[in-house]
């Protein structure tokens, strides 16, 4: 059943989602409905990447709209339908110069439709299924297991067939030799013996034909399985690995593939043994029109071809190149050790330590002026073995040094080995995903951006010239990748409202961001307006700050983080006094975090106030939860007060942060942390002396952060000096700057 027809038969709750999907003007539902069959039959994915294909489909789309309009006219359909079709065609004309943009939009809508269908099917399955302890196999896995079991069964039956045929041939051979040795002169007896021999030979001939036919059927099944393993399962694993390299939570376990590859290799080697046995039997007994003579060479060629293809595909890079302290895989630094692991998915015990893997770099380097070449220093040859794998797989784990940097220049590490077993010799080769090689740590951030962009968009892992004609990314792709960065670093990704804020920062206010596109230049090269840094530098700075200083607060959901100032005020103005939220700064290059809270004037007007963002340097000196805990402001009457009472939306502060406090409230404290909010409406000296005499005299250690210090009188310096020489044994003045 066509996808559109399946959608139309869904329950009302899912039909509402379809209505919402086609609520905008990007792609009209009328066009989707009337051209459903044609739309679903086209390769929009290819069209989105190929201008020529996109142009052909664009022209055909316009022709189909003309045809549909003619049908409306001939069928006497309403004038409104005729008008709408003409309007839609006119609207699509804007894609005349860039038809691949329209292809991308149609591709996206089809993908969203599939998501709705999958959600509906999943909901239906949840209602029907019982609780299961083990994870469910996919339909594809079940199908492979069924075909694999069928292949093994055919091989076992063929073994029995070979034994029976060998017995038949032995019987014929014995009687034929006996007949020749006896040399009877009785014609009647001689004729009878010849009839018996002919019957035995006919039976033997039929058995050979049946066996050859059975081998052909067996190879049909093996070829079908090979196509599924190599063209589907292995390709899907490679894409999962590519996404996992940039943070996606995809499984890259190879154990199941290894099991399947090994089983099929065992079956194909058995078929080779069957053919070899046939050749031996033919050497002992042959005759005119012997089917083995005619059919065996073709079958031999076929099984060898299948086996070669299987073995070549079985040599993979299990763990992509990475440095121990790197930002992520595929970014390597010269003169710094990196590791990479290869694996052979045909697990034969007799191959343990028998296959040597050799490594080189840039074997097929592009012929581009200025393209650098690198050598690999260290052990460049290693045997595949089972000792270095946790699962017992056949692996070779390399650790190297590079001999020697442009962060958009891609390089590939190549691996070679030779398979030699049972007179089968096959040269095997595999390669890593493209890596970026840097010469100092300052390049790591931009290099990692290159790796993210490549693996997010490129489906051709050997395309070393990817950045010479770099494609744009759709917002859904970019948003998912950005969320993976937080997910892989902190185990918590980005929520939809956080992604919406980032999209707004990149594209401005839009009703829907799904059709928005971003170029590589805007992502990593152009500065964000009114700043001196790029979007990626800003985002990565926040990620590093969270990972280094705020991971627990981020994981438990305390940090809203990506929220604009305007949205922040809208949220807080509706809340009770003292409600605050935590958000990332948009103006600090390497990551900053601040908090804002709502207060109310005597007339009931809400007032949202914020403090200067705290940087990684600040957070390295004082934990953020301690800053929130001890923050105080001094205003009227010089009474210190902590205005932070409820974490948005309404969680008491102690409930949200109490588990992180390093000291319990009350008791004998020896260390105080003072955050002084300075208001020009009262005397700074009086405020400070009042706070000092009322609150700090019991502390042996004081840390002072004075916030909002603009145009302070010089006498403030005397306060600092007084504190420094007072009975307090230690005093640290950490920050004094206006924001």
Image (cartoon, rainbow, N blue to C red):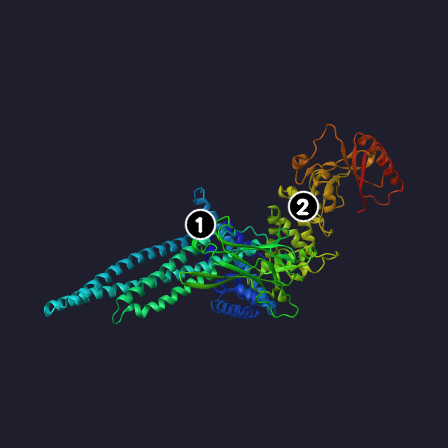
- Total labels: the figure holds 2
Of the residues under marks 2 and 1, which one precedes in the sequence? 1
Rendered-image quadrant of the N terminus: bottom left
Residue 690 placement, left or right of 325:
right
Task: Tell me the mark number nearer the camera, choosing from 2 and 1.
Answer: 2
Residue 143: x %, y % from top left: 41, 54
Residue furthest front in the image: 181
Could you tell me residue 665's position as x and y percent? 71, 30
Can I make out residue 120 in this image? Answer: yes
Displayed quadrant of residue 723: top right
Q: In the rendered view, tell whether residue 722 sits above or below residue 328.
A: above
User: Which residue corresponds to the image point at 24% horizontal and 59% vertical from the top-left?
Assistant: 167
Q: Are marks 2 and 1 in contact (CB under 8 Å)?
A: no
Q: Which residue is mark 1?
A: 137
As displayed, is residue 486 above or below residue 693? below
User: Residue beneath label 2, please?
Assistant: 548
User: In the image, residue 578 lies at what x, y percent?
Assistant: 72, 38
User: Picture quarter containing residue 469?
Assistant: bottom right
Label 2 Cα crowd, 10 Å radius (few <14 / some 14-19 / many 20+): few
Q: Closer to the camera, 361 or 688?
A: 361
**CA separation, marks 2 and 1?**
39 Å
Q: Is residue 401 left or right of residue 425?
A: right
**SS under mark 1:** loop
Task: Identify the residue at the far top of this view.
Answer: 667
Q: Give percent across and percent down for residue 555.
A: 62, 43
Quarter of the image for residue 47 reads: bottom right
Residue shown at the point (40%, 65%) measured from the top left: 304
Tell me, for residue 189, which label it has, or none.
none
């Amino acid at each position: 059943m066509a996808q559109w027809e399946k959608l139309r038969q869904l329950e009302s709750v899912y039909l509402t989602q379809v209505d919402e999907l086609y609520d905008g003007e990007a792609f009209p539902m009328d066009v989707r409905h009337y051209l459903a069959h044609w739309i679903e039959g086209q390769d929009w994915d290819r069209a989105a990447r190929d201008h020529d294909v996109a142009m052909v489909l664009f022209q055909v789309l316009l022709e189909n709209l003309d045809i549909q309009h003619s049908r409306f006219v001939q069928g006497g359909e309403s004038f409104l339908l005729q008008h709408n079709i003409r309007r839609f065609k006119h609207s699509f004309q804007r894609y005349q110069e860039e038809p691949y943009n329209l292809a991308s939009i149609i591709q996206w809508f089809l993908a969203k439709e599939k998501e709705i269908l999958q959600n509906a099917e999943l909901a239906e399955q949840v209602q029907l299924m019982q609780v299961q302890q083990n994870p469910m196999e996919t339909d594809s896995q079940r199908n492979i297991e069924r075909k694999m079991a069928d292949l093994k069964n055919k091989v076992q039956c063929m073994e029995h067939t070979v034994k029976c045929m060998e017995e038949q041939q032995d019987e014929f051979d014995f009687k034929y030799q006996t007949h020749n040795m006896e040399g009877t002169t009785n014609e009647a007896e001689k004729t009878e013996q010849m009839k018996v021999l002919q019957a035995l030979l006919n039976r033997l001939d039929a058995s050979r034909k049946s066996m050859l036919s059975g081998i052909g059927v067996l190879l049909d099944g093996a070829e079908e399985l090979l196509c599924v393993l190599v063209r589907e399962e292995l390709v899907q694993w490679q894409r999962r690995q590519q996404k996992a390299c940039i943070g996606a939570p995809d499984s890259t376990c190879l154990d199941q593939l290894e099991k399947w590859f090994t089983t099929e290799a065992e079956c194909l080697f058995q078929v080779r043994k069957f053919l070899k046995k046939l050749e031996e039997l033919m050497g002992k007994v042959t005759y005119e029109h012997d089917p083995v003579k005619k059919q065996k060479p073709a079958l031999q060629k076929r099984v060898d071809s299948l086996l070669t293809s299987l073995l070549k595909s079985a040599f993979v890079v299990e763990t992509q190149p990475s440095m121990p302290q790197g930002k992520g895989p595929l970014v390597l630094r010269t003169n710094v050790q990196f590791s990479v692991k290869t694996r052979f998915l045909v697990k034969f015990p007799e191959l343990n330590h028998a296959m040597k893997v050799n490594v080189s770099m840039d074997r097929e380097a592009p012929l581009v002026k200025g393209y650098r070449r690198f050598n690999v220093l260290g052990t460049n040859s290693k045997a595949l073995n089972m000792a270095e794998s946790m699962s017992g797989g056949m692996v070779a784990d390399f650790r190297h040094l590079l001999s020697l940097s442009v962060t958009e220049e891609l390089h590939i590490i190549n691996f070679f080995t030779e398979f030699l077993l049972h007179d089968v010799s096959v040269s095997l080769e595999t390669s890593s995903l493209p890596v970026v090689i840097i010469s100092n740590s300052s390049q790591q951030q931009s290099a990692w951006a290159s790796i993210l962009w490549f693996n997010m968009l490129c489906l051709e892992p050997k395309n070393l010239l990817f950045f010479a004609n770099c494609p744009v990314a759709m917002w859904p792709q970019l948003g998912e990748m950005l969320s993976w960065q937080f997910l892989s670093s902190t185990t918590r990704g980005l929520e939809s409202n956080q992604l919406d804020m980032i999209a707004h920062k990149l594209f401005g206010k839009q009703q829907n961001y799904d059709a928005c596109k971003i170029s590589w230049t805007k992502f990593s090269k152009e500065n964000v307006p009114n700043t001196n840094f790029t979007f990626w530098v800003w985002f990565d700075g926040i990620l590093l700050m969270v990972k280094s200083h705020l991971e627990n607060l981020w994981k438990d959901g305390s940090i809203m983080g990506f929220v604009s100032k305007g949205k922040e005020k809208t949220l807080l103005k509706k809340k009770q006094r003292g409600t605050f939220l935590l958000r990332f700064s948009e103006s600090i290059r390497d990551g900053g975090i601040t908090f804002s809270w709502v207060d109310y004037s005597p007339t009931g007007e809400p007032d949202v106030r914020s403090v200067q963002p705290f940087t990684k340097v600040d957070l390295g000196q004082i934990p953020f939860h301690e800053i929130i805990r001890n923050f105080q402001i001094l205003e009227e009457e010089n009474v210190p007060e902590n205005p932070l009472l409820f974490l948005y939306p309404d969680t008491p502060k102690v409930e949200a942060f109490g588990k992180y406090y390093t000291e319990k409230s009350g008791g004998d404290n020896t260390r105080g942390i003072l955050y002084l909010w300075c208001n020009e409406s009262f005397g700074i000296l009086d405020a400070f002396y009042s706070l000092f005499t009322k609150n700090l005299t019991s502390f042996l250690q004081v840390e002072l952060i004075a916030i909002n210090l603009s145009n302070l009188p010089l006498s403030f310096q005397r306060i600092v000096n007084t504190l420094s020489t007072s009975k307090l044994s230690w005093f640290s003045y950490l920050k004094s700057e206006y924001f």
